[in-house]
Amino acid sequence: MVALAPNLISQTITAIDAALADRQRPRFQRRLSGSMIGKECERAIWFQFRWAYEPERFSGQMLRLFETGHLREPRVFRELALIGVKASDIDPETGEQWTFTELDGHFVVKIDGRGTGFVEAPKTEHIVGIKTMNDKNFKELKKVGIAVSKPEHVAQAQSEMHCSGIHRFFYYAVNKDTDELYSGADVRIRYDEVAAIKLMVKAKRVLDAIRPPEPISQDRSAFACRFCKAKAVCGGEAFAPRTCRSCLHSTPALGGDAEWRCEKHGTILTVEDQEAGCGEHLFIPELVPGSQIDVAPDGSSVTYEMPDGTTWVDGIAQEAA
């Protein structure tokens, strides 16, 4: 029997990965969230909230990895039940994940679960936050603790406690390479009102900002910028997608549930409206890779000088960038 060459790639496995990738339907993130508010750079948060770059598409392998993380969650609750923790991952009123909002729905947290019966404080209700990480990150977590190694996770925990009114958080972290559980004394995170309010103020600044905040660094090779998904549009190298979120006429509306309003037409925009945009779209200037040099007297168009010296007019009936 002739042995198969070890460097050949299985067409079946390739087809599986391709099928997983093809069936994904990436969507823009509708609201600010606890998982994004801990980012150090407010400009990066603003770009994400304003849909300044296309939603990320993942490989079949990455999608499988995400699903593995979700499949672990029922196991976590079974393990907690073994020691008498009574926890729930579903809101019985909605049949869905526990969800809490602030800032008229523009800020959302979705918690993995909530429960009582933890050994250290059996009567105190805790949020359950489940995190999986590779061996390298897990070792760093064990070495320096949650606050130093995972500050974004701490920010997420604080925002979840603030929005839910549950003032303890149990950090259930798993080494996905070895199944070891993190057992540091800091797994129980206490609510810090000052820190939580600062995060909400930060979210409100992003919500209210008509133009992008200043970047965290002018050096695009800085670590915080190197892998940022908004790097191209932030650096003036690419257009943002043409949606209502990137338009001068749209603003987040107050008094509703994460509503957006078109000031041009005086209408509330559905998510589908926001994704589609309209023919009277005008880019927020920082979302155009050029320098603004003129504005029509009636405000219907804006002219830019592009890096190559040509001019580009943004306005009614312009083709999508």
Image: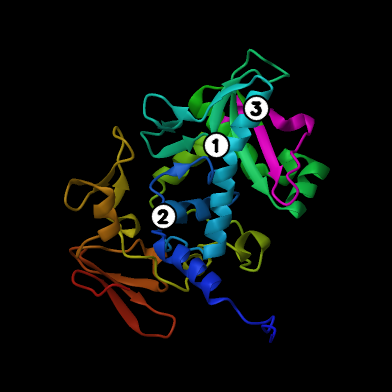
Residue that protrudes farthest toward the right in the picture: 143
Q: Amino acid at mark 1?
A: Leu
Q: Amino acid at mark 3?
A: Leu
Is the C-beta separation of discs 1 and 2 under 8 Å? no
In the image, is 251 to the left or to the right of 161? Answer: left
Image height of 242 relative to 95, above or below:
below
- Mark 2, Cα crowd under 10 Å, few <14 / some 14-19 / many 20+, is some
The foreground one among 205 and 121 is 121
First of labels 3, 1 by sequence position: 3
- Residue designated by label 3: 80
Q: Residues within 10 Å of mark 3 (few under 14, many from 20)?
A: some
Please state, as top left, top right, bottom left or bottom right, where the N terminus lies in the image.
bottom right
Residue 10 is situated, as x and y percent measured from the top left of the image, at: 57, 76
> Which stretch is magenta?
171-196
Q: Position of residue 256 (x, y in %)?
A: 29, 34
Residue with the mark numbered 1: 199
The front one of 7 and 319 is 7
Q: Looking at this rendering, what residue extends furthest in the front direction?
A: 1
Please say whether residue 39 is one of the residues in the magenta stretch.
no
Helix, strand, or loop for circle 1?
helix
User: Given this view, does label 3 or label 2 mark the residue nearer the observer?
Assistant: 3
Mark 1 or 2 closer to N-term?
1
Measured from the top left, where is residue 104 in percent x and y? Answer: 36, 33
Establish if 215 lies above or below 30: below
Q: Residues within 10 Å of mark 1 (few under 14, many from 20)?
A: many
Instruction: Tell me which amino acid carries mark 2.
Output: Arg
